[in-house]
Image: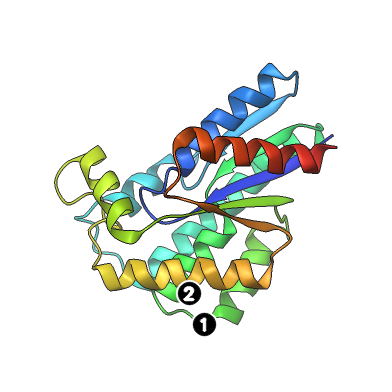
């Protein structure tokens, strides 16, 4: 059966680790799994990830938003939807909820406009299950910056108030879509978090 699972959260929350662990676990269970990420996981849009992350990129907030949406349109059309149509499980590190949290709550773009643009760009492809790893901002940013060195990438270098708005955005989305978006405690160990991830996914597969 096809299943679309996404992982979300602030910088350094551990979502990439959990996405990779889940993909490996499901493959070991005999499932056909596609592990992917946004932005930049298509040949045509790899450059977008580099541009968005580069601290030297002098991007207007509207240009930034449109780059994310262009990446999503290409990603959904060439990778996500074909895999779902083949009956695969798609595990994606970041997706539409990041756009709402970062571009809407973080940058201040109109939420209704964002949702409309995202539905268009994604062809209304909505995850079946979203894991939101809710991590303390200071802890997450410290992890992310330690991983990259220095002040981090273009988003990690943003002021703490920006990241607080993003975290509040994810909380608002979880409150709005409690069945789809499941909150996981980012303060738990990797093993404890992964046990919770496995339980949530199994409940959707059963």
Q: Residue at x 75, y 18 (%)?
A: 30
Q: Quadrant of residue 75?
A: top right
User: Quick check: 119 above or below 191?
Assistant: below
Packing grade of label 2 (10 A; few <14, some 14-19, many >=20) is many
- Please report whichever mark, 1 or 2, sits nearer to the chain's N-terminal start: 2
* Colour scheme employed for the rendering of this structure: rainbow
Q: Quadrant of residue 149?
A: top left
43 vs 49, left or right, is: right
Q: Nearer the viewer, residue 126 or 132?
A: 132
Q: Which residue is mark 1?
A: 110
Q: Position of residue 147 (x, y in %)?
A: 25, 38
Q: Which residue is mark 2?
A: 104
Contact between labelled residues 2 and 1, with CB atoms less than 8 Å apart: yes
Disc 1 versus disc 2: distance between alpha carbons?
A: 6 Å
Q: Residue at x 39, y 73 (%)?
A: 165
Residue 188 visible, this angle? yes
Q: Residue at x 24, y 50 (%)?
A: 142
Q: Nearer the viewer, residue 176 or 70?
A: 176
User: Quick check: 27 above or below 6?
Assistant: above
User: Quick check: 54 above or below 59?
Assistant: above
Q: How many numbered markers are drawn?
A: 2
Q: Position of residue 13 (x, y in %)?
A: 41, 49
| Quadrant of the frame with the C terminus | top right
Identify the element where label 1 is drawn.
Answer: loop
């Amino acid at each position: 059966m096809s299943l679309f699972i996404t992982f979300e959260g602030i910088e350094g929350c551990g979502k990439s680790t959990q996405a990779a662990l889940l993909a490996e676990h499901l493959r070991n269970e005999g499932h056909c799994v596609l592990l992917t990420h946004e932005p930049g996981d298509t040949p045509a849009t790899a450059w977008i990830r580099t541009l968005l992350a580069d601290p030297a990129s002098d991007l207007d907030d509207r240009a930034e938003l449109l780059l994310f949406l262009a990446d999503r349109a290409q990603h959904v059309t060439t990778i996500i939807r074909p895999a779902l149509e083949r009956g695969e499980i798609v595990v994606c590190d970041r997706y539409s909820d990041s756009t709402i949290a970062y571009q809407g709550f973080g940058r201040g773009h109109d939420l209704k406009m964002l949702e409309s643009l995202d539905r268009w760009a994604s062809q209304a492809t909505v995850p079946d299950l979203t894991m939101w790893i809710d991590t303390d901002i200071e802890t997450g940013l410290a992890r992310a910056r330690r991983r990259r060195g220095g002040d981090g990438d273009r988003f990690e270098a943003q002021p703490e108030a920006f990241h607080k708005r993003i975290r509040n955005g994810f909380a608002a989305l979880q409150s709005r879509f409690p069945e789809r978006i499941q909150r996981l405690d980012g303060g738990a160990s990797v093993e404890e978090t992964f046990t919770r991830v496995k339980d949530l996914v199994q409940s959707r597969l059963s």
